[in-house]
Amino acid sequence: MKNFIKNSLTYLFIISASPAFSQINLEGFSFGAHGSYIMVGGGTDINNMGGGMKLSYALEENMVAYLGYNHYLPSNHDTYVYGYRTNEEIRPREIRIDAVEQISLQQFVIGAKYYLMGDYEAIGGLYGLAEMGYLRAPTRTHFSHYDQENYKPRHADGFAASYSSYNINIGLGGEVDLLFGYLFAEAKLNLPANQAGNRAVISEIPTSVSFNGGIRFPLYFF
């Protein structure tokens, strides 16, 4: 048993001291964290702050592929619904109930950026980007006080819904080396994808403009 333990520790030391084991090289990978702001058009008045993250891999010095996610904080919008009488003898037949609609946004993207100036490891760079994305808007409506004994809206305790849209996003970005990471800023136009192949796609969320600003960290472990 003692010889087995001694031999095992010896082999473990040899393996851990070898170059293949002692250096895990993730060159080309980077992780980014950023703050975000989005403005949704179509008269929605949705302007949400949020944040996100991005995992990138350099395919070439001037071409990078990435996966990203943004989560936007809820925004509140005044609205109203109608409450309907629960008894035929009650007048009026319906009443207006003030409400607040709370809208969040979640965005998933897969994309690529191409450096127009500089490259992935340069002191500074300017790049264009293109993405395919999925934008989701969970929504919950909260009612104000009303005569709950005699009137009921179609959803008595508030109701939840979720809207979504597939997007094609295009934009520009720039970054500068801070020695420990890269400071970057991006602006994007998020266009609803109205057609996939020969099939029409329902876009429930209008065109939006979004901005990201954050830091990208190269993932090197030694």
Image (tube, grey):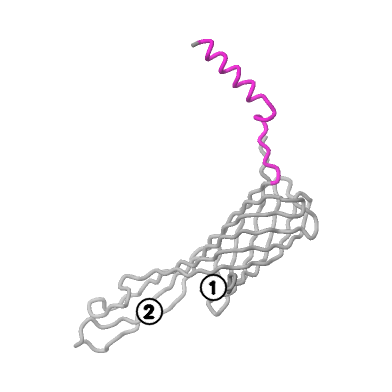
Q: Position of residue 203 (x, y in %)?
A: 53, 73
Q: Earlier in the sequence, mark 2 or mark 1?
A: 2
**Disc 2 + disc 1, Cβ < 8 Å:** no
Q: Position of residue 200 (x, y in %)?
A: 55, 75
Alpha-carbon span between mark 2 and mark 1: 33 Å
Amino acid type at mark 1: Val
In-front residue for pair 2/172:
2
Q: Residues within 10 Å of mark 2 (few under 14, many from 20)?
A: some
Q: For the residue marked with disc 2, what is the amino acid?
A: Asp
Is residue 214 rendered to the left or right of residue 125?
Answer: left
Looking at the picture, how far across and down is residue 180, in whole percent? 70, 45
The residue drawn where x is 27% and y is 88% is 93
The residues colored magenta run: 2-28
Quarter where residue 87 is shown: bottom left
* Residue linked to disc 2: 98
Q: Residue furthest top?
A: 2
Q: Residue furthest right?
A: 117
Q: Of circles 2 and 1, which is in front?
A: 1
- Label 1 crowding class (10 Å Cα cut-off): few <14, some 14-19, many 20+? some
Asked if residue 24 is positioned above or below residue 179 in the image, the reply reads above
- Classify 1 as above or below 108: above
Magenta stretch holds residue 4: yes
Which residue: 34% across, 82% down?
A: 82
Q: Which mark is residue 39?
A: none
x 26%, y 80%: residue: 151
Q: Is residue 168 left or right of residue 86?
A: right
Task: Identify the residue position indicated by label 1 in the image.
Answer: 201
Q: Residue at x 22, y 77 (%)?
A: 149
